[in-house]
Amino acid sequence: MNVGQHTLREILSQPAAWSAALRAFEQSQSETLDLWATADFDQVIVTGCGSTYYLSLAAAQLLRQSGVHASAVPASELLLRREAVCLPGARYLLLTISRSGTTTETLRAQENFAKAGGRVICITCDSASPLAQSADLAIAVDAAQERSVAQTRSFSSMLVAAQLLAGALSGQSASVGAGLPGACVALLDSCADSMRLLGQDERLCRFFFLGAGALYGIACEAMLKMKEMALAHSEAFHPLEFRHGPMSLVGADSLVIGLVSPAAAQHELRVLQEMRVMGATVLVISQSHSEFAHHIALPADPPAACAPALHLPPLQLLAYWRALKNGCDPDQPRHLSAVISLDDI
């Protein structure tokens, strides 16, 4: 068996998984809007664990951009410190996110929230899971389930669904995401060689992912993929925050990856220029032109709310190739399992 074969196949199969995510959301859109209209929610709480907590960070930001008051918390915080998350008398909608739909903290947090009279939407990759079955509404992308431990197509497919959900709550048609699978095909083709070369570059041993807004959650997920798959030193920061201390780590052994947002491109690119002067190799992922030698150009036409998912495939490939370079098996990261099950919560 080839090391990492499942991870690579799952990364490359994302266009089909995204198409499945579009269909899953379209099938639930009417019911979603009905649920939203039935109660006057004060806030949406988005929750998950590990990768799906980082997905929650991105989803909450997308909801806020759509005019919805939303916040993200790890499921363990909602489960163990509910009084610090939920204000007395406030009306909340809970959005839970879990690939398996069986992660203990997320499942218990949802159960307790529902027992208290709260309404729940879940996004998952298993429509038969306890999380999906006990939610008021489940958006399930079963086709995105994986054999690998580290999430790749499952994460991005659930993010596509979350993007569409945020758009729908602001009156946006789900058709805005129709071009995402095709854009993913083109992206995977255009970045494959460059991600392999950067991932296998033996000069690089520190990886810094910079992103703001919804892209901060994506930067965190990319950081986690590099840790999980490759056991490599990786960190995630907001771009301008990087100047406030963390940049002291930057040198010739560093790859600084900028997930550049259109709204703040001028300021974020300036940070990246400074990192290049300090000796770092810089990779820019953006929807606009860039002067950097390593640049992945995303399509300019998708709305900003649909762009976050497009940043993921190159970063997943980068972690995959670094894992092989480091002698790791990205299919089965050290010490990890696909689902965390706890008996004492």
Image (cartoon, rainbow, N blue to C red):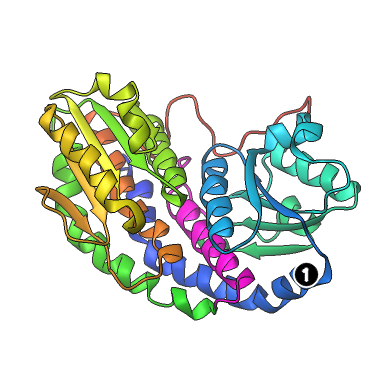
Tell whether 343 sits left or right of 8: right
Q: Residue at x 27, y 24 (%)?
A: 247
Pointer 1 local density, CA inside 10 Å: few below 14, some 14–19, many at least 20:
some
> Image height check: is 247 above or below 110?
above
Residue 313 visible, this orientation: yes
Is residue 158 found inside the magenta-colored segment of the image? yes
> Image height check: is 7 above or below 165?
above
The residue closer to the viewer here, 137 or 213, is 213
The residue closer to the viewer here, 23 or 257, is 257
Tell whether 287 sits left or right of 294: right
Residue 329 visible, this orientation: no
Q: Amino acid at mark 1?
A: Leu
The residue indicated by pointer 1 is: 35
Residue 274 pos. (x, y %): 17, 34
Residue 265 pos. (x, y %): 28, 52
Q: Residue at x 77, y 29 (%)?
A: 80
